Amino acid sequence: DAKTTQPNSMESNEEEPVHLPCNHSTISGTDYIHWYRQLPSQGPEYVIHGLTSNVNNRMASLAIAEDRKSSTLILHRATLRDAAVYYCILSDFYGQNFVFGPGTRLSVLP
Amino acid sequence: DVKVTQSSRYLVKRTGEKVFLECVQDMDHENMFWYRQDPGLGLRLIYFSYDVKMKEKGDIPEGYSVSREKKERFSLILESASTNQTSMYLCASSFWGIENTGELFFGEGSRLTVL
């Protein structure tokens, strides 16, 4: 199974941009890159996903390297509510093989 | 609103008991998943199912079995609970095929304690 590696933790100041990196050097050509986050005492929630091109939605942006071996989740303006564990995940085309790693714990400082 | 409902938020069982964790989704999703979450280990996939009566092992299936008799319901079974199965169990569901939404919907979790 394709795996990802992320830093264990990161800190950001409120209202500043946050760049959360993810390495996935063994990604295959058909693997999708997903980001989820988990707030305290809740199940994970979807943030964004992509295949090759950069993606934007109301929550975040996803920047995918040209060789697809890494990606970056960008939160444009961190708020205190963005403090969570962020997971970078690869899945196959059918969306069936979602394997979560330990994720990155993001702290947002006021 | 989309909904994944897990039958129990908190359970306390004794070693050797049979445990059923139920999960129901109302979104007509083909895929359903069971994960367990432990501190420092993130979420680990136990089993998933892509259709009624179909199941695939995840990373840590030992000590668990699953049942999917109806599309909306996916059950996780611990035949003989052990203390190392004390954990948070999370159910999720999704459409088949990433091009639909690429999104997993999670339930709130079931915290199981085995004494």
Image: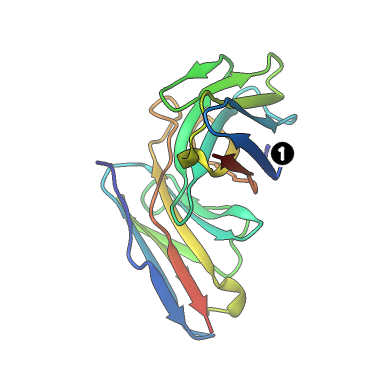
Q: Position of residue B65 (x, y in %)?
A: 50, 65
Whether residue B16 is situated above or below residue B32 in the rendered picture: below
Residue drawn at 73 percent across, 31 percent down: A26
A10 is higher (above) or lower (below) than B34: above
Which image quadrant for residue B44? Answer: bottom right
Residue A91 at what x, y percent from top left?
56, 35
Q: Is residue B78 visible?
A: no
Identify the coloring. rainbow
x and y, in percent, of residue B22 in the image: 36, 64
| Label 1, residues with CA under 10 Å away: few <14, some 14-19, many ≥20 | some
Spot occupied by residue A75 in the image (x, y as percentages of width and height): 53, 27
Q: Nearer the viewer, residue A15 or A94?
A: A15
Q: To which quarter of the image does residue A59 belong?
A: top left
Q: Which residue is mark 1?
A: A5
Element class at badge 1: loop
Quarter holding the N terminus of chain B is top left
Residue A3 to residue B92: above or below: above
